[in-house]
Amino acid sequence: MLTIERLSHSFRTGQDETPVLHELSFRVEQGEMVALLGSSGSGKSTLLNLMAGLMKPTRGSILIAGQAIDKMNENRLAEFRRTHIGFIFQSYELIQHLTVRENVELPLVFQSVASQERKQKALALLHKVGIGDKAEMFPSQLSGGQQQRVSIARSLITNPAIVFADEPTGNLDTKTEKEIIDLLIDLNKNSGITFVIVTHEHEVASRTERILQLRDGYLLENSDQAGEAG
Ligand SMILES: Nc1ncnc2c1ncn2[C@@H]1O[C@H](COP(=O)(O)OP(=O)(O)OP(=O)(O)O)[C@@H](O)[C@H]1O
């Protein structure tokens, strides 16, 4: 599903080059749920931006669903992102003047899907993430955990090959964090959705099947959590 091969990245500022990621190689299989764990400055955001096609790597390659995204031109990449990749953000990134349902439908508006079909899909997903009754409310009327559920529903509406979640519970209290991770695990187990969850929290990472640990731009661990996953 996701194959990273000898991926390196450096930022250039003037004459200086700052290496941030060093020859990372790993795979995430279809239906896996993987945590990308690392402390602040370890390179998580850089790696996420590269995997999401928002930046080009200095060296190495990134394949998603068999396609080398580092080789695509801007238009192709934008289209690929819209149709193959889902995103969940720490701060939800919902549009405040649209209803919950309209927020979830939005990625399909860009794909010119007919309104009735959009509505149907959005409502089905809102039910799936446990907030079917909130469809006609506005984001500001929802709790943080509920807003994150909206953002999860929105990330899934295009049937993406893979979903990247960037600190998805970073703004939530411990109880709500657990509920959101439970939901992601449920979606992974029951719907086979592939997730990569970026986090600096061991508690979050420990609930996934596998942890990829970054330290100072190096991949430390590529460990199965067989006991945890059961
Ligand atoms: N545009 C940039 N130009 C130069 N250096 C950068 C740039 N972006 C990031 N860096 C450096 O790359 C390193 C990794 O940063 P990155 O944001 O990827 O880490 P992170 O693990 O996501 O941290 P955090 O959890 O705090 O967001 C840091 O040392 C940072 O200063």
Image: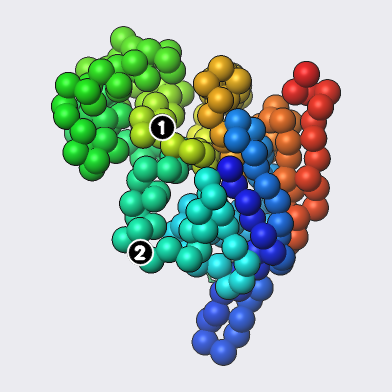
Give the numbered dot on residue 74.
Answer: 2
Residue under the image location 72 percent in, 45 percent down: 212
At which x and y percent is residue 12? 55, 79
Say which element carries label 2.
helix
Taking depth in this image into account, of 183 and 229 the one nearest to the observer is 229
Is residue 199 in view from this perspective?
no
* Residue 124 left/right relative to 191: left
Residue at 32% x, 36% y: name it: 94
Residue at image point 30% right, 21% down = 121
In terms of depth relative to the viewer, which is nearer, 36 or 64?
Answer: 64
The local secondary structure at tag 1 comes to: loop
**Which of disc 1 and disc 2 is earlier in sequence?**
2
User: Circles 2 and 1: CB distance less than 8 Å?
Assistant: no
Ligand 1: image quarter: bottom right
Residue located beneath label 1 in the image? 159
Residue 123: where, in percent of width, then height?
A: 30, 17
Packing grade of label 2 (10 A; few <14, some 14-19, many >=20) is few
